[in-house]
Amino acid sequence: MPASVEIVTIGDELLLGATVDTNAVFIATALSEVGVQVVRRATVGDTEEAIADAVQQALERTGAVITTGGLGPTADDLTRPVLAKLFGRELHEDASIVAALQELWRTRGRGGVLPPSNLQQALVPDGAEILVNRQGTAPGLKLTDAQGRWVAMFPGVPRELRAMVVEHLVPWLGAQAGDRVLRSRYVRTTGIAESALADKLGAMKRRVESLPLAYLPGWDGVDLRVTAADMSASEASAKLDAAVEQLRQAAGTHAYAVDRVSMPETVLAMARAHGDTIAVAESCTGGLLGTRLTDVPGSSDVVHGGVIAYANHVKEQELGVSSDDIATHGAVSEPVAVQMARGVRGLTGATIGVGITGVAGPDGGTPEKPVGTVWIAVDVRGEVRAIRSVFIGDRPEIRHRATQSALDMIRRALLVLAS
Amino acid sequence: MPASVEIVTIGDELLLGATVDTNAVFIATALSEVGVQVVRRATVGDTEEAIADAVQQALERTGAVITTGGLGPTADDLTRPVLAKLFGRELHEDASIVAALQELWRTRGRGGVLPPSNLQQALVPDGAEILVNRQGTAPGLKLTDAQGRWVAMFPGVPRELRAMVVEHLVPWLGAQAGDRVLRSRYVRTTGIAESALADKLGAMKRRVESLPLAYLPGWDGVDLRVTAADMSASEASAKLDAAVEQLRQAAGTHAYAVDRVSMPETVLAMARAHGDTIAVAESCTGGLLGTRLTDVPGSSDVVHGGVIAYANHVKEQELGVSSDDIATHGAVSEPVAVQMARGVRGLTGATIGVGITGVAGPDGGTPEKPVGTVWIAVDVRGEVRAIRSVFIGDRPEIRHRATQSALDMIRRALLVLAS
């Protein structure tokens, strides 16, 4: 079996629905790379009883527990005292942490003087290991009992937690895990439903290379995940590589990337390889396609930019869309999408122009053009293709799916050019 | 005490780190509105033992359990059989579900014929209540034991789960909860650090109107949450309203909204009230400011659109930015931000123009302009203000913080106009 840990996330805000817990995802991803499996996760509020109970149970089951949150300077930050009590330790003030906090206040423009409330963050259970936090004020702590069972406490601030997991936890657990790994690979598909994809996979529908296959549908499409558990790194690599190759073959042109590569990254790499540049003209997506493309570091050699043509007069004046066509066919129509794509290509000098115009909802739908109706046009070096889609979901989902579909149209056009 | 439930989310993908669990947030938010508190959450993989164990423990503790996931048509969907076994029930095929599935395949362009694998979704534990799913194929199920303890099973697809929680769970739990409520309200602040905000609040630092206060720092700023538990709805409303008013006063102009109102919603409402319109010129944010503004339904009366000026030649040609200024001061500079704001205002005829240019990283930083350096200019009816900031975080965080800061500059300019 691969090494196992449990996560206990602590904080009322996670139960009240104010905050999405992205830390757990980060930890799981980081640990799976070194063959350590998160086997269970619990989320509890800021109460002594719930924290102690959840950590105690996880210690009894798995003996290896990561907590996040509850290390801040306020009265509802209970992780430190509760876990000290659970391990039967007293708290003492650590001089090195006090000094580090004072230094932080002195140098980082926080006002010069350490507030008394932050001294709580210098309290350390006897015998605990201190895990340095280079991004913030609360250090992490690790407690180990006589049976070797341990709990590692991290702050809940994502930026701090991420740096500390990479610095402290991954190297340490990686060294313990030895050569048995848990590893997943992904084949990412779009433009095809889960059941149709399963049919395409035929005999590989549930297992490929004897590894279990999972279907993960989302706004980007359906990701296929294949997982190798409890084998050596070399065996896992060989099986996963073979499985990914077979899945890519079976999914055909619906497969746009493997592993964590995004659609924008795929499209940017293909455009770069062809010497193409991209400009966007966005109405209903309001800049989301530009945002997704420029989320990728180093996208500036491919992305020129474009026009957010939310108002019709911007479509007409900036992109040269015909006001007659808007009057006759409506702003959500094939001629308008085509003229937006052509217009932004001409305006910026990019080799690829994209036009998106649609009804993102919740209002504005009609029987002929219900909410979700989107016209997308892609002009690749003067050759224009336009597609009408009706995307499901609410406003954010419709907008995301529209940008994914636009990127897929660029990808398919570049695939044809390459062949 | 308010009524309590626990959530058990089921799915390997949640443990492997492939998926962020947004369902739990939605459920917690929806239930808190009817005074029901999520007191604990567990996440387990697709194994019989883990599912049975987590649900069993939650039933023993709280007696009221919501599960999400594991109701799909594939072999790793175990929720249905595992919970039937836990409750000592047999599974039978439900004719009404079979008929509904056949109808769905016949009418929704899924290929006409129901695949055999989907028949699994028609299996129902004896005595279970069927919860209709109008958005997808897997119905929900509710099992109740002789002691009145219950588990309600929902699919993991967010769109389906959300509709079903609103249709089935909220009315039913709301009716049970009676007149004791759990309710939170929020005062949202930006441009001020958590500790400085606490200092400003003085005596209200931890409690206001005897209600506990929590600090929730994030990319948008610091949200203040005040919570009323276990009191009547009218008492809670009165205390919360008074607390929110006091917090707003104390936070001053840093408070930009209450409850779930976003910064874009605040700015759009203010602009609408003043008869102002907005256009954006974005370099390092690549369309994110436009995206955030147009995320809001009905934003089209205020937002004209704008220019994604990622490449310098787009800044020059579309926005009239001086190439000399780019050469002399660099693209990330005050004159360039100012000319972008002015340029996009002139181009679109909007009354407010925004220019954003910065170093989002991870590369491109210099000693004078480190990663995170962003110049933002706002031109409100010809009056221009520009600010240089150095935002912390990685590329997505820097970009988000830059748009939040730009929106806050518009808000503050409109506040001054209004006074």
Image (tube, coloured by chain):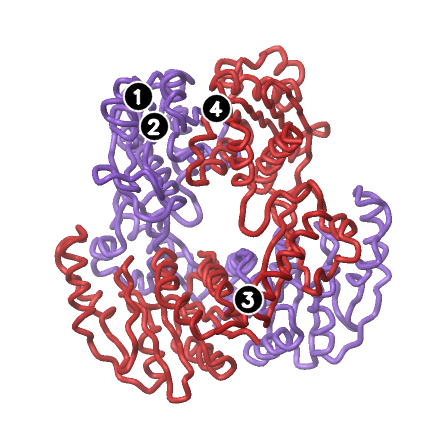
Chain colours: A purple, B red
Q: Tag 4, which chain?
A: B
Whole-number angstrom distance, CA of label 2 to CA of label 1: 8 Å
Q: Position of residue B80 (x, y in %)?
A: 32, 74
Q: Position of residue B243 (x, y in %)?
A: 67, 57
Name the residue beneath numbered marker 2.
Answer: A355
Name the residue beneath numbered marker 1.
Answer: A339
- CB of mark 2 within 8 Å of CB of mark 4? no
- CB of mark 4 within 8 Å of CB of mark 1? no
Whole-number angstrom distance, CA of label 3 to CA of label 2: 50 Å
Residue type pointed to by label 3: Ala
Query: Are labels 2 and 4 assigned to the same chain?
Result: no
Name the residue beneath numbered marker 3.
Answer: B233
Q: Residue at x 61, y 29 (%)?
A: B358
Q: Tag 1, which chain?
A: A
Residue type pointed to by label 1: Gln
Q: Residue at x 57, y 21 (%)?
A: B341
